[in-house]
Amino acid sequence: MDYDSKQVWKDIEKEYGISKRAYALKINFVTDPFKREIIFRDIGHSYYLASSGLSKPSVILAGGVIEELLRLYLIHKNITPSRNDFNAYIEACINHKLLKRGIFRLSDSVRCFRNLVHLGGEEDKRHTISIATAKGAVSAIFTISNDF
């Protein structure tokens, strides 16, 4: 299966019920056109990888998208996290009540799975990322964005 960005976004709309255009409106705080394009690209790639059975790179990309969205959302809200890392972005969102409780837990869950990028984190088969986890990470992008 060859990668086709337009088809991938049609598939995303069919599976998750959100079009690229509707998603663009949800992330209107991302004003830099280049960053927006990178976010759309990485969402498409993450979905494509998950759909192709390549779960680990899918989760890594989805986690990167969520991390960047949280970072940009905090900038938009004029909030400076204690550090520039995924965990600090989640903490800042919690401390400023920017995300519902379940949403920040979802963000943290994706962060934990994304950290399995380190080979030492995959200690046995239980720590290997499944396709279901990858699909969940892609879904988390849209779920988290509903709170922006």
Image (cartoon, helix red, strand yellow):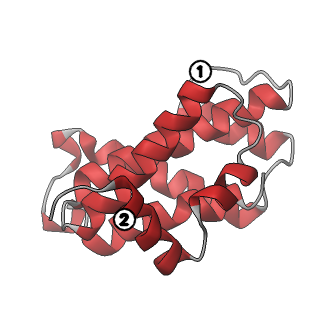
Residue 125 location (% of width, % of height): 13, 66
11 vs 142: above or below: below
Q: Is 84 on the left-hand or right-hand side of 99? A: left
Q: Nearer the viewer, residue 112 or 66?
A: 66
Give the mark, 2 or 1, whose residue is nearer the N terminus: 2
Hey, which quadrant is residue 69 in on the image? Answer: top right
Q: Is 104 on the left-hand or right-hand side of 140? A: right
For label 2, the residue is 7
Element type at mark 2: helix
Could you tell me which residue is drawn at 57 percent across and 58 percent down? 20
For label 1, the residue is 84
Q: Quadrant of the N terminus?
A: bottom left
* Label 1 crowd (10 A; few <14 / some 14-19 / many >=20): few
Please count the marks in the image. 2
Could you tell me which residue is drawn at 37 percent across and 65 percent down? 7
Q: Is 71 on the left-hand or right-hand side of 109? A: right
Residue 124 location (% of width, % of height): 13, 60
Question: What type is the residue that disc 2 sits on?
Answer: Gln
Could you tell me which residue is drawn at 47 percent across and 35 percent down? 38
Hey, which quadrant is residue 143 in on the image? Answer: bottom right
Front disc: 2 or 1: 2
Element type at mark 1: loop
* Label 2 crowd (10 A; few <14 / some 14-19 / many >=20): few
Could you tell me which residue is drawn at 24 percent across and 55 percent down? 3
Residue 119 location (% of width, % of height): 16, 41
Question: What type is the residue that disc 1 sits on?
Answer: Asn
Q: Nearer the viewer, residue 110 or 54?
A: 54
5 vs 19: above or below: above
Q: Is 127 on the left-hand or right-hand side of 81? A: left
Distance in Å between CA atoms under marks 2 and 1:
35 Å
Q: Nearer the viewer, residue 10 or 31?
A: 10
17 vs 82: above or below: below
